[in-house]
Image (spheres, rainbow, N blue to C red):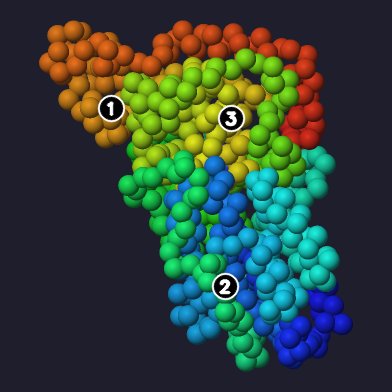
Amino acid sequence: MPKWISPCRLSPIASRAGRINVPLSVVWFKRDLRTTDHAPLMNAITQCVQNGDELLLVYLFEPEMLAHPTTSSRHLCFQWQAIQGLNQRLVSQGLSLKIHPLQASAADVFKWLHSQHQLQFLFSHEETGLRYTYERDLNVKNWCARNDVVWNETPQLGVIRGLQNRKRWSYRWHANMRKPPIKVDFNPWLKAGLLPCIPEWPSPWKMTAPPKPTHEHDVLGKGPFQMGGEEQAQQLLTSFIKDGRIENYQKHISKPEESRQSCSRLSPYLAWGQLSMRQVFQALEACESKTMAHRAFGSRLRWHCHFIQKFESEHRIETENMNRGFDDMTVVTNGDNLLRWMNGDTGIPFIDACMRCVRETGYLNFRMRAMLVSFLTHHMGHSWKDGVNHLARCFLDFEPGIHFCQFQMQAGVTGINTLRIYNPVKQGLDHDPDGLFIRKWVPSLQEVPLAFVHEPWRMPPLELAMQGGDTRSVAPMIDIKATARQARSRLWTFKNHPAVRAEAQRILNVHVDTRYQRRRRP
Ligand SMILES: Cc1cc2nc3c(=O)[nH]c(=O)nc-3n(C[C@H](O)[C@H](O)[C@H](O)COP(=O)(O)OP(=O)(O)OC[C@H]3O[C@@H](n4cnc5c(N)ncnc54)[C@H](O)[C@@H]3O)c2cc1C
């Protein structure tokens, strides 16, 4: 018998209304909308089969989620699509189960289920999320303890709660990834003739379409967006590893257009848990050829969990500098410039093309993301905090653990990473030499000769006049070279500050494996 099953609960119990009710087991889907390699789902089925419990599957679009400044419609649609896909799959397997999407808070739903349906067991994955999910989970935990509800939380793959340092983390990660995936088998549940719970939900909680964010900063885009769903995730994985999209992985990884095809594009499915990291890892391991591309891709799978582990261990970095030594660094606040950056209207073609592309489609490769952050924080001199929510809303694959860590790394406020100030003109020339990506996303430059497409401000007056423009219409928002110089001196002065160095050592001790620390003294 699994250890969470308490023998005293093995018999039906009387409900508050005096009816004889069977206890209820609930699977609370979070960032894990899949039915394969899903321990909480398997545990719930086992519990129901052994105990005769009713089973209920829920996904909650909570008010805090809808109000959070990192949330955008594209995230909500992606999750909604996954729920629809999973429900179709459950029906096709002859199951009367479905995932109930509800627009309500966890506290309200679980209280209601406890009073109306004898909620006894709650199954979910641990979540390394934002502050509101952390506080919500603490409340749910306390509520469960007070109400004698057993909450069985399974660790997320590759992330260890309560970890003090990174000793043997990589070893443990690999061991975890090599374990057989959890086989979710509904047959015992079907054979036992068990019933799903079909609650008559309060009307305001019921949903027929994906919800909208309740804040005012939603980022709308025409798409096409990747479509949410476990099936879509599996198909993409197959096309990348088995059907050979991986071949050009390294060649195209930094190309803004080609990376859309040659990178795996698995990030939204991994971020929202529609595919487990173990499934991707094992698909890669099963592959016979082991090229540089395979190895490079494999490392990134580990990075994914490495960053989430950082966030799990130090989640204050959602709002604070990872290295507190940078707290006194002066930052610029220029609302007009910030808006121009957010809208892709800086006058620097490659920056604008990248921003417009990610706003419209939800995807940008790693280097281009890093360049947008570098431009905001180094050239424009803004705090990373001014742009972190905007890009979270733009990225379909928003994953708090990776996003906040990467943002701070690129902003240069960790004190342990190499400082990179990307020159957006050079990046454009290197990765979009024919200006095709720029012309696609900045149509006003479509007729501009290639010689000037990366730096239209260099166009001679005659050429400009032929394009129907003038010097003002092509002036960049800021001088790239001068602002890069200022940023370099600002950051280097700080990097050598004793407070920054002390913090850097602390960060290394907590977040970096001792084997690598020797190579990375601050
Ligand atoms: C400022 C900034 C913010 C970012 N925010 C996110 C985010 O919110 N969510 C997110 O998934 N990635 C984020 N990344 C990392 C990276 O850009 C994306 O994971 C990657 O571009 C996704 O494309 P892909 O799935 O085709 O990646 P692939 O290159 O095919 O890599 C496979 C998987 O490895 C992981 N991965 C790849 N690169 C990284 C990396 N540098 N760090 C951590 N994991 C990585 C992702 O899960 C990815 O799906 C961010 C990077 C930067 C610079």
Looking at the rendered structure, which numbered label has been put on residue 477?
none
Cα–Cα gap, marks 2 and 1 = 55 Å
Lower sequence index among marks 2 and 1:
2
On screen, residue 10 above or below 332: below
Label 1 within 8 A of ligand 1 by Cβ:
no
Residue located 41% across and 57% down the image: 227
Q: Name the amino acid type tagged 1.
A: Gly
User: Residue at 45% of width from left, 74% of height from top?
Assistant: 88
41 versus 30 height, above or below: below
Image quadrant in which you'd find residue 25: bottom right
| Mark nearer the N terminus (3 vs 2) | 2
- Residue 202: numbered disc: 2
Question: Which kind of residue does numbered mark 3 sit on?
Answer: Lys
Q: Secondary structure at mark 3?
A: helix
Q: Which residue is mark 1?
A: 435
Q: CA distance from mark 3 to mark 2?
A: 38 Å
Name the residue tied to disc 3.
385
Q: Is mark 2 within 8 Å of ligand 1?
A: no
What kind of residue is marked 2? Pro
Q: Earlier in the sequence, mark 1 or mark 3?
A: 3
